[in-house]
Image (cartoon, rainbow, N blue to C red):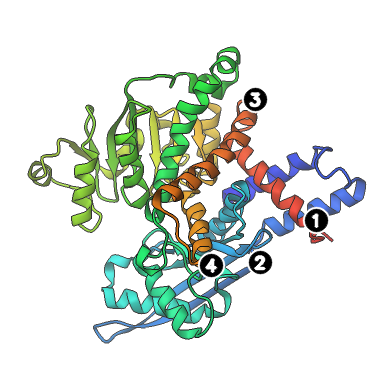
């Protein structure tokens, strides 16, 4: 489980030393119980994989590796996205499934953790071929998915289109069974929830805004009195004008977070840089985010890469290599691309003092430690990018009740759910020595441990 597993083990060791946690467990019984917890949380319940047989339009038959990992269902049905990416592998899917278990536990969402992956670059397949891949994935894994078993959702390389296709196939091969909750992240016309596509990006920006606007201002007296290193870092952001942001990744998460920052009335933001797999665009005076969103919508999600394209769209920006985004001198860096973007070989070049993880695991363990030692405030994935799974839960509920919420109600419930988590986590973070990631993991692991103990699963 890589970084996730390391911090889970660390969290368990800290919890075990706290005699006020599960005080009935003492002596050898406590040792045995925590050995059981380590075994349960460090390994997935199930790893399913198969080679999908796909007939391409050329007549060629290919076999495509596909995964579905079910990490833990202590709190409810397995839940997690399906990733279409040429570099996805078993280890990554296991790690992401574990992260989903912790994310749901942290935010009190009644799901377990799962994750899927198909080893393809979706850009290299036609729409018909992608439709067939989706159908085959559902057929091959039909026995393990369903509204009360394991509920997939979109992830990198997938969207509401793929979820619509998959749910249709699930319905076709399971006649008479409930099907609306078999997949989330569907289109609104196909039983999806209003606001689901934007939920992760909105949640990412809300995490940032709540910390440096609401929480900091509400607790300013305590922040002024403390010598806590992370609190001192955050104080530098009070009423800062303008607040310069860079956003790596301009897909569903990054573009929505960028637009939220652009229109925000609470903070004087200036989004000076954005990037995708091809390019970094930079403007010291701030980028025209709505224009970039319109451009990507018409160009298969890609940002402009040439001066000619920028001039045609009346967008002012300098063009740099796509990796340059990480090293720009900004106040806030939002990582909304892929895993392992900041690592031990490039972390020293990162200048931002506040980093928000919109993607899953974008910072390696070594880089994470380096940044924490420098007093960098990192809002970790498990905390900040949970908007998608929270609204997926709301979609799942709506499908069961066949009653649908307005977009305003969806966002209201999303923000209330995330704020409740922040108000549990931030006071502890700014009053002891642990990083925010560690605080989140400790709270998530505590919830899982308590539930496993009460269910009698430690013996």
Q: Which residue is mark 1?
A: 454
Which one is closest to the eye, mark 3 or mark 1?
A: 1
Q: Which residue is mark 4?
A: 400
Instruction: Say whether marks 2 and 4 touch (CB < 8 Å).
Output: no
Q: Is residue 64 above or below residue 74?
A: below
- Give the distance between the C-alpha atoms of the residues marked 2 and 3, in whole angstroms: 36 Å
Which one is closest to the eye, mark 2 or mark 4?
A: 4
Q: Is residue 120 above or below residue 111?
A: below
Q: What residue lies at 24% left-to-right and 31% top-to-bottom?
A: 286
Q: Which residue is mark 3?
A: 431
Q: What residue lies at 29% left-to-right and 82% top-to-bottom?
A: 56
* Residue 401 x, y percent position in the rendering: 53, 65
Q: What residue lies at 41% left-to-right and 53% top-to-bottom?
A: 406
**Residue 375 in view here:** no
- Give the distance between the C-alpha atoms of the residues marked 3 and 4, in whole angstroms: 42 Å
Kindly identify which numbered label has been placed on residue 45. 2
Query: Mark 2 or 4 closer to N-term?
Result: 2
């Amino acid at each position: 489980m890589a970084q996730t597993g390391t911090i889970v083990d660390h969290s368990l060791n800290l919890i075990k030393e706290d005699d006020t946690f599960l005080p009935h467990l003492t002596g050898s019984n406590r040792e045995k119980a925590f050995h059981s917890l380590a075994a349960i949380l460090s390994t997935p319940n199930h790893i399913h994989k198969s080679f999908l047989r796909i007939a391409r339009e050329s007549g060629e038959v290919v076999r495509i590796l596909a995964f579905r990992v079910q990490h833990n269902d202590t709190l409810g049905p397995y839940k997690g996205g399906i990733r279409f990416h040429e570099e996805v592998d078993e280890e990554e899917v296991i790690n992401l499934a574990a992260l989903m278990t912790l994310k749901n536990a942290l935010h009190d969402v009644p799901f377990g953790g799962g994750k899927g992956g198909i080893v393809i670059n979706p850009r290299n397949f036609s729409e018909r071929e992608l439709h067939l891949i989706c159908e085959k994935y559902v057929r091959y894994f039909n026995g393990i998915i369903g509204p009360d078993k394991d509920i997939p959702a979109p992830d990198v390389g997938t969207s509401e289109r793929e979820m619509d296709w998959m749910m249709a196939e699930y319905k076709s091969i399971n006649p008479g069974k409930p099907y609306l909750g078999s997949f989330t992240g569907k289109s609104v016309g196909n039983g999806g929830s209003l606001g689901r596509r934007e939920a992760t990006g909105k949640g990412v920006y809300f995490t940032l805004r709540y910390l440096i606007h609401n929480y900091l201002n509400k607790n300013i007296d305590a922040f002024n009195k403390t010598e806590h290193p992370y609190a001192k870092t955050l104080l530098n952001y009070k009423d800062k004008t303008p607040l310069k942001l860079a956003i790596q990744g301009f897909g569903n998460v990054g573009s929505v977070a960028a637009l939220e920052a652009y229109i925000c009335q609470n903070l004087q933001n200036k989004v000076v840089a954005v990037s995708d797999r091809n390019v970094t665009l930079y403007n010291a005076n701030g980028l025209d985010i709505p224009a970039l969103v319109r451009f990507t919508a018409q160009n298969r999600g890609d940002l402009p890469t040439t001066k000619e394209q920028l001039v045609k769209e009346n967008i002012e920006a300098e063009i740099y290599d796509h990796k340059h985004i990480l090293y720009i001198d900004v106040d806030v860096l939002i990582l909304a691309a892929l895993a392992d973007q900041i690592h031990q070989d490039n972390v020293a070049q990162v200048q931002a003092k506040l980093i928000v993880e919109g993607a899953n695991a974008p910072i390696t363990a070594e880089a994470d430690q380096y940044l924490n030692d420098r007093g960098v405030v990192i809002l970790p994935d498990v905390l900040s990018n949970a908007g998608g799974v929270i609204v997926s839960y709301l979609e799942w509920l709506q499908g069961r009740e066949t009653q649908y919420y307005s977009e305003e109600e969806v966002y209201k419930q999303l923000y209330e759910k995330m704020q409740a988590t922040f108000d549990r986590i931030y006071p502890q973070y700014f009053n002891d020595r642990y990083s925010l990631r560690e605080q989140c993991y400790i709270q998530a692991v505590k919830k899982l441990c308590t539930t496993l103990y009460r269910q009698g699963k430690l013996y």
